[in-house]
Amino acid sequence: MTVIDGKAVSAKVKAEVAEEIKKLCREPERAPGLAVVLVGEDPASQVYVRNKKRACEACGINSFEYLLSAGESEERLLELIDSLNRDESVDGILVQMPLPKHISPARVTESIDPYKDVDGFHSQNVGLLTQGTPRFAPCTPLGVMRLLAEYGVEVKGKNCLVVGRSNIVGKPMSALLLAADGTVTTAHSRTADLAFHTRNADIIVAACGRPGMITGDMVKEGAVLIDVGITRVDGALKGDLDFDSCARKASFITPVPGGVGPMTIAMLMRNTLRSYKLRKGIEV
Ligand code: GUN
């Protein structure tokens, strides 16, 4: 059994991005730029935004931060996005989710220039991913695919189970596994017999946000287990897998923290570089 080291793979991806930017963006060429918008003071979101800024610095990406108060109107946010869409020094725009209740996430997502949508949330990018010709795929599922590749896990022909159907993780995760020729099942909160599906799966990606929900007795011997869940329980971070019992069955398993988590920001750096190249007509 191998515990997948997300921190190490994340560092490797960021180093690759930094290296490519160093080659690509020699003076007087400008560096790629990422704008990150945070509305409100959610502590978890503040941590993410700080980490994104740090990763940008490490990769040689210019980061532009916009911190708006929780009471900011949707109209003002849309105006800001409009100005970022027109700003030539900005290649990627990310609006941190979740947004305050009075702001429509769909309206915000659709207002971002689809060529700057490094989150891959815009309907145009969702459509392209579904058609199997992605422009930008969401960062967390991309990070999972990179972990599988890095550890030599083949997806082709495997029974893949995604637990969760969110727009940020579950749905794009299923689309990416399908594009990699997996036989994909998407389970969710209304799935009648989850254990039936988990026991049949060669690869499970758990992204339902229910700590410890998948236990060792529910998984096949030798399965590859990827845990996207991060829930704070009594001050500690818990994944959707019950780690100890699952680890006894798995061939590969990701820990929480230190598994999928660090990959999201690394893939955001990759997507920002990709956006820079697409916008400059450089082959990706
Ligand atoms: N909140 C949690 N994950 C994400 C993400 O990948 N992108 C954005 N914009 N917000 C998030």
Image (spheres, rainbow, N blue to C red):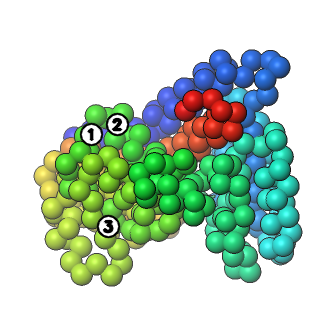
Which type of secondary structure does the marked residue at label 1 adopt? Answer: loop
In terms of image quadrants, where is residue 56?
top right
Which type of secondary structure does the marked residue at label 3 adopt? Answer: strand
Tell me, yes or no, whether the two marked residues, 2 and 3, touch with CB atoms within 8 Å. Answer: no
Position above or below: 204 against 280 = below
**Percent coordinates x, y for residue 245 in the rendering:** 23, 57
Amino acid, disc 3: Thr
Q: Which residue lies under the disc numbered 3?
A: 186
Position above or below: 90 against 15 = below
**Relative horizontal placement of residue 53, taking residue 242 as reference (left or right):** right
Query: How far apart are the two marked residues, 2 and 3, measured between alpha carbons?
Result: 21 Å
Q: Residues within 10 Å of mark 2 (few under 14, many from 20)?
A: few
**Relative horizontal placement of residue 91, taking residue 270 as reference (left or right):** right
Q: Residues within 10 Å of mark 1 (few under 14, many from 20)?
A: some
Upstream in the sequence, badge 1 or badge 3?
Answer: 1
Q: How many marks?
A: 3
Q: Which residue lies under the disc numbered 1?
A: 153
Residue ID at (35%, 74%):
188
Query: How far apart are the two marked residues, 2 and 1, measured between alpha carbons?
Result: 6 Å
Q: Residue furthest left?
A: 221
